[in-house]
Amino acid sequence: GFAQLDVQRAARTGDPEVVYGEGKTPAQIVSALRALHAAHPDRAVLATRLAPAALARLAEELPAAWLDEAGRLAILGTPPAPVGTVAVVGAGTADLPVLREVAATVGVFGAGCDEVVDVGVAGLHRLLAQRDRIAGADAVVAVAGMEAALPSVLGGLIGVPLIAVPTSVGYGWHLNGLTAWLAMLNSCAPGVLTVNVDNGFSAGVAAARIARRTARP
Amino acid sequence: GFAQLDVQRAARTGDPEVVYGEGKTPAQIVSALRALHAAHPDRAVLATRLAPAALARLAEELPAAWLDEAGRLAILGTPPAPVGTVAVVGAGTADLPVLREVAATVGVFGAGCDEVVDVGVAGLHRLLAQRDRIAGADAVVAVAGMEAALPSVLGGLIGVPLIAVPTSVGYGWHLNGLTAWLAMLNSCAPGVLTVNVDNGFSAGVAAARIARRTARP
Amino acid sequence: GFAQLDVQRAARTGDPEVVYGEGKTPAQIVSALRALHAAHPDRAVLATRLAPAALARLAEELPAAWLDEAGRLAILGTPPAPVGTVAVVGAGTADLPVLREVAATVGVFGAGCDEVVDVGVAGLHRLLAQRDRIAGADAVVAVAGMEAALPSVLGGLIGVPLIAVPTSVGYGWHLNGLTAWLAMLNSCAPGVLTVNVDNGFSAGVAAARIARRTARP
Amino acid sequence: GFAQLDVQRAARTGDPEVVYGEGKTPAQIVSALRALHAAHPDRAVLATRLAPAALARLAEELPAAWLDEAGRLAILGTPPAPVGTVAVVGAGTADLPVLREVAATVGVFGAGCDEVVDVGVAGLHRLLAQRDRIAGADAVVAVAGMEAALPSVLGGLIGVPLIAVPTSVGYGWHLNGLTAWLAMLNSCAPGVLTVNVDNGFSAGVAAARIARRTARP
Amino acid sequence: GFAQLDVQRAARTGDPEVVYGEGKTPAQIVSALRALHAAHPDRAVLATRLAPAALARLAEELPAAWLDEAGRLAILGTPPAPVGTVAVVGAGTADLPVLREVAATVGVFGAGCDEVVDVGVAGLHRLLAQRDRIAGADAVVAVAGMEAALPSVLGGLIGVPLIAVPTSVGYGWHLNGLTAWLAMLNSCAPGVLTVNVDNGFSAGVAAARIARRTARP
Amino acid sequence: GFAQLDVQRAARTGDPEVVYGEGKTPAQIVSALRALHAAHPDRAVLATRLAPAALARLAEELPAAWLDEAGRLAILGTPPAPVGTVAVVGAGTADLPVLREVAATVGVFGAGCDEVVDVGVAGLHRLLAQRDRIAGADAVVAVAGMEAALPSVLGGLIGVPLIAVPTSVGYGWHLNGLTAWLAMLNSCAPGVLTVNVDNGFSAGVAAARIARRTARP
Amino acid sequence: GFAQLDVQRAARTGDPEVVYGEGKTPAQIVSALRALHAAHPDRAVLATRLAPAALARLAEELPAAWLDEAGRLAILGTPPAPVGTVAVVGAGTADLPVLREVAATVGVFGAGCDEVVDVGVAGLHRLLAQRDRIAGADAVVAVAGMEAALPSVLGGLIGVPLIAVPTSVGYGWHLNGLTAWLAMLNSCAPGVLTVNVDNGFSAGVAAARIARRTARP
Amino acid sequence: GFAQLDVQRAARTGDPEVVYGEGKTPAQIVSALRALHAAHPDRAVLATRLAPAALARLAEELPAAWLDEAGRLAILGTPPAPVGTVAVVGAGTADLPVLREVAATVGVFGAGCDEVVDVGVAGLHRLLAQRDRIAGADAVVAVAGMEAALPSVLGGLIGVPLIAVPTSVGYGWHLNGLTAWLAMLNSCAPGVLTVNVDNGFSAGVAAARIARRTARP
Ligand SMILES: Nc1ncnc2c1ncn2[C@@H]1O[C@H](COP(=O)(O)O)[C@@H](O)[C@H]1O
Ligand SMILES: Nc1ncnc2c1ncn2[C@@H]1O[C@H](COP(=O)(O)O)[C@@H](O)[C@H]1O
Ligand SMILES: Nc1ncnc2c1ncn2[C@@H]1O[C@H](COP(=O)(O)O)[C@@H](O)[C@H]1O
Ligand SMILES: Nc1ncnc2c1ncn2[C@@H]1O[C@H](COP(=O)(O)O)[C@@H](O)[C@H]1O
Ligand SMILES: [Mg+2]
Ligand SMILES: [Mg+2]
Ligand SMILES: [Mg+2]
Ligand SMILES: [Mg+2]
Ligand SMILES: [Mg+2]
Ligand SMILES: [Mg+2]
Ligand SMILES: [Mg+2]
Ligand SMILES: [Mg+2]
């Protein structure tokens, strides 16, 4: 076949391989997700970055799959019972697709998820109102584009492990998210961790691992 | 002489030429400031970006000059009576030299100045406590380095004309202020204006012009 | 709904939220503009960056809206009576769309607008002929692409608050407006303020605020 | 004084402020560390990025401080009893200063630290021999310069939360660590988190927070 | 005609000209390949970077040509008997097109080829299992995208001449292969040679020359 | 010796080799200039980019040489009788060193030179006053830093061959002259030619060639 | 109308305005060329960067125009009798469109043109065979993409004024011509002048001016 | 000790570790070279990038070492009998330090070396005169800075494996060798391999491996 799935990954690192949809045909995505599900029948598997055509094909051929159009993703199989909670905090409505990618990944990788949307710093009161809810999570993921001030403000308000995801959202010359990325890496709040632009998946993997371990009884 | 002063500038634009100290010897700076003062005997003139040696020479040869070591600048002659007020808001103590350059320029160019220091977003309560004071000014200059979240937060809280000055302050790879600069140009708050990195002088000129005109009786 | 409008913005900063059309469907734009108008029945609201399809849909569904094809924008409701004047100065005909975005924003945000088009420095006499007209405004916005020499020449001729908008207009390798942007930030004229590439909206907001306050009786 | 210490930070986020030595005189560093210690008498405080002159001055004036020359840092007061373990893994001997900054920060912020040095991928057997030791930690920090292959190899071998710190170590044109930084953000292993170039402090803060919470009984 | 083929190249450098398909119409490609074949009737000639339409046209008009869809290339005529062996090692399945371009070029330029696919460092055991097979070749070409850790790991395991080909494969902000390119040029393993992003052809030419000469009896 | 002079260059291209002083010791510069003079006894030879120590040594050991401290250069031997005229136009006093390098090169390469200094666009009247003088030259070299608007304004006023030299002069973030360089390459005036940042020598060579040929009787 | 033609340009600089086709509709191009022709009935006018649709429309509506498909341009009216000669030298067949833009501009701006095509340095003998022909011109324009070695080799062989035009031609990561541009600005041959990437028009204007003046009797 | 030498490298890859002098004290270099020699008593070992102080200390403490000041390196012990020949071709005298690093590495790694200096393309005849000598080698290393046209010209003349080393040599804005680097990666000659800027060591390792194997009897 075109792609060789790394079906031993779960044994090695505790978490299964996923399907990255960009650059794959709908048919390839369906068959990859089916194969992954067959290799891990007892736990949910995930496909990300799905174009509308791929989502449509999945709806037809794998009706058991749960689809999220805004998040451009699909889940097949039952997610594990959640251990620990990740607060996923988004700055604007345009950041929603990345926020959903974080949330779905967190669920598939075994943690619970609390979505806090549209709390960007241009209307600060919205964020301050949610401070305690966010501070109660086991890990926080902050999703923001443009100048990405959100994680710096958050990082001054809480001491929970904090991952910042820069998005390629912006007006005009934002360099496809480079601005947000540089901002997050230069945050004046100590301990802000980051991932690549729009990489909600990688942030979700890391956050779930932290939350699962933090909350283990 | 080495530098030809543009002594007609005040007639053309309303504001006099200044002395930019970088790349000039102490002797050149003294003589340039003296010449500028002679051309504008009835109003204060300014020299910026002065190295310690230049400040020392000025103290000796032009004892009438007012010197600001933190701001690396000198003023000779009496500033105009201030018309209008500029709030100059700084994120951290390391931004102080640029903040002082703004403040001195504002004074020499004829407006009053209210300095609000060390109110960076990592400790948000400090900024919120000063909100009304800042909102009462005729123009606001926000000085910040690193990820420069300050002007975005401010821009969501007030409707006063707002100029953001990126500084070259940061830990590690901040690209000499490029990060702050990009952040300011991509602010999610509408109407944020900006200048070059560390260019407190240009921000001060613009802010004074706005404040003077805004407040005219 | 998809986008949550920030309807309290006017209360917080004095100016209402607007609709940014890029990345939104015609249907989303129509409904956002309608909602904004409902929240601010007594003043004009604005939608920018409208593709031809969006303009066509607005013409059909909101016939009361005023449409500007060159400026790719729409206004719904009656703009406030203008207070003060902004001169909007454009270098070339290709800069027109951005110039119109400035002009429409200035009007919606409450100031009057004087458009001075096609006065780029390659034919200097055209600009010199308009010098006094421009110098009489309460704020000036200079719109230019390519090497963006216009604001530097203007900045040496007048003392009015001056905002420069770089455009992504150019032949060959102009880096999507980076050249114009760098030129404006390195202007040899003091006090030149700037915004992001093509961001006529943000420049218009700032200019209107300056003009309104300057001219208040 | 010059710098205003944020002495409420511990109350807000659970961890105290630290002293960043770059750009400060030895005298300023001594007085800042002393003030921080006075504000937190019952827990260790940290100063980083200390030049040899600053270390010498501290040795003289604060003999109770523990100094690490390779790590360019100082600790004053007794660190908390460690909760949980962070494995700090370094690629080459030139990465040692950053590795030590991670280790000291981890200790001051309350976790235990296991240093695994000189296990870069050019001699793979060295890393493979330590796999189980690293996999047993509560959090892992991988420090590497040049092409920074280490976190990718590690990320394929373990499922522990993993933070990668790019260093400015390299031969020739490595762009002051940009190469390592880009490599870490583009890791083929999922869940790799990162911080700014050479920012061992921020990685240490985050790792300690994860380990402390993970291991809480 | 549009393109003048350099038919003396084989006389000058020992290897014939090839057809680079990008930017050429299917008709131009067919005629160029035909002309090249006529000039070199006794040895295979190569066309690279063929779009699906070009491959289809070749299938019709030059049925004697051997086509490789994954590699986007065509070979016309009989390749020379292979002298020496090049191991072509690929990190992931998405690197396959470039890997095939290397392999076809190696064959046309007179060496044998051993393809080792999908042995990226995220699953290290796969690479270690092939170490001796790779070490037995006369030259090695390592093809990798993303953070491109493969050549560094390989370079520490073998002493065979090693050429690294960066690919433009990646998720998110990988800068069209710049990340892989920088990583290869900063490899901690000495003696790693490299070519432009995705340039499997140039790597194949060089590897075949090395293998042919190395193995000459 | 360390450097091999290309003494046949005059025969090949009509103009002799010169000594580039950067990175050479005073002793090396003296001996190179002496050797060049011996090879071309009947015409002037040039040394550029001389540090103060090199100028001092030349004053001592080659008293016949003509030295220009502001231009950091030396000329040994009699320049040719000038044929044609190059107008060398400088924006600001800080551009003087580059302007002088142009002028000296023009003279040594056989054309006459008319220096027009300090006519930057911030005080436009100064340039307009010199328009006819500049338009009368056989070639024009415009030297400018910062946003480098001068060549665009000039290019709209005259039709003489025009070479623009960007300088590394600027306040703050001007990217070592990149801003000026980009501006010149994106000039809205057609026919503006350019050279590398600060490369007055190369501009002088080209301008002298144009002027010499243009004016030949 | 949409575009205001600068019909006084010929009076000011000696050469008329031209039509730049990029971003204009076929109808706008036809009407602009017609207007330009009306303003300059006694000399040829030029339109560049024409898409196939624009060329087709011109063929229909202005049958008197001379069209060059490879060069993407049109000429309307009789060019001036040529004065002097420009050698236009191209490296490869893919550089042809830019070479033709140079040639057409040279003709319209009043000089003669000698096209020397496909003499790139990879087959050096081709260039050496044309050396004397090129050396006999009044000005030389060298057009090259990729690594752009051609102008450096030429610059060592001749002393004629030499303009280098970088093209955006290349395989893989050539940064849209940045590589060629940097190479030309760093040429080891003195006196190489350059223009923006693909800007054959600007090079043609400058070369024609040099050749016309050089050859004037 | 500070640095752990990788003394098993020869067993793994066939070639021993070397000492990289940059960033090490003279004392560290002496002791590292001594230790390396002790581990490999029967073959030469190498230290590169030695500052004058390090060379002086080596002369004193290890009088048996062979020192090359121009190449900034030292060799201790007897090099292997050379197998095969590497032609090392340099463009200008300023490239000499890198050329010598290549040559010394080639010798220590077991091949013979033929140095061909100062044959840059600005004086093409010099290179053409050496064509056959270079074509007779088993591998070629071309060392060049500025626009680095040399490898492209060479690559069109010979079919021997060719490694290009960009140097950081240039006048003005050459971006520390980036220009040369980009030029080499975009060479129009097929099969040009490259390494990092100034990395003569890595090129020497690769060339020696190719030559040794090519020539093996
Ligand atoms: N043309 C424009 N350029 C940049 N920003 C704009 C523009 N028009 C509107 N905006 C911003 O976009 C916001 C609305 O964005 P949205 O909520 O995505 O519709 C406004 O509050 C403005 O800050
Ligand atoms: N090594 C380090 N790298 C980056 N940031 C640091 C480092 N050490 C301390 N910091 C930050 O610097 C702040 C103190 O800076 P300052 O007030 O300038 O001394 C701390 O709150 C940390 O956020
Ligand atoms: N100021 C300058 N800027 C750039 N290149 C120069 C300059 N002066 C001389 N050159 C070049 O440097 C070469 C001599 O360099 P060198 O052999 O290193 O002394 C000359 O042939 C010129 O091409
Ligand atoms: N001139 C050089 N340029 C780049 N890398 C080098 C050079 N010389 C030695 N090296 C590398 O540096 C390593 C030794 O570095 P170190 O352990 O820091 O002394 C060697 O194994 C080589 O890979
Ligand atoms: Mg919103
Ligand atoms: Mg502070
Ligand atoms: Mg126009
Ligand atoms: Mg080591
Ligand atoms: Mg795979
Ligand atoms: Mg001046
Ligand atoms: Mg060809
Ligand atoms: Mg030489």
Image: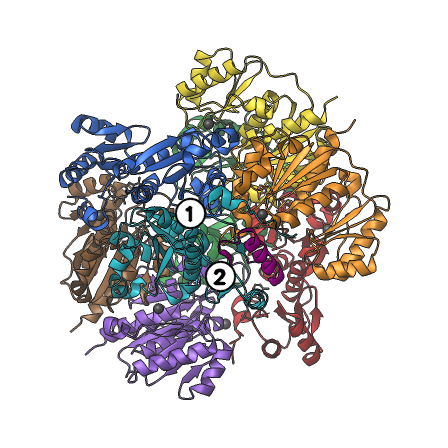
Chain colours: A purple, B green, C red, D brown, E cyan, F yellow, G orange, H blue
Chain at tag 1: B
Mark 2 neighbour density, 10 Å: few (under 14) some (14–19) many (20 or more): many
The three-letter code of the residue at mark 1 reads: Asn
Q: Nearer the viewer, residue F20 or G56?
A: G56
| Secondary structure state at the residue bearing disc 2 | helix
Residue for badge 1:
B176
Residue C161 in the image: above or below residue E55: above
Please provide percent x and percent y for residue D40: 20, 57
Please provide percent x and percent y for residue C1: 52, 81
* Residue numbers of the magenta segment: E21-47
The verdict on residue B179 being magenta is no
Q: Is residue F114 visible?
A: yes
Mark 2 → mark 1, Cα distance in angstroms: 21 Å
Tell me, yes or no, whether the two marked residues, 2 and 1, touch with CB atoms within 8 Å.
no
Please provide percent x and percent y for residue H23: 27, 39
CB of mark 2 near ligand 1 (< 8 Å):
no
Say left or right for G86 vs F22.
right
In the picture, the disc for residue A93 is: none
Residue B119 in the image: above or below residue B30: below
Frontmost of labels 2 and 1 is 2
CB of mark 1 near ligand 2 (< 8 Å):
no
Say left or right for C183 vs E98.
right
In the picture, the disc for residue A176 is: 2
Residue C105 in the image: above or below residue H166: below
Task: Kindly indicate the quadrant of the structure image that contains residue A68.
Answer: bottom left
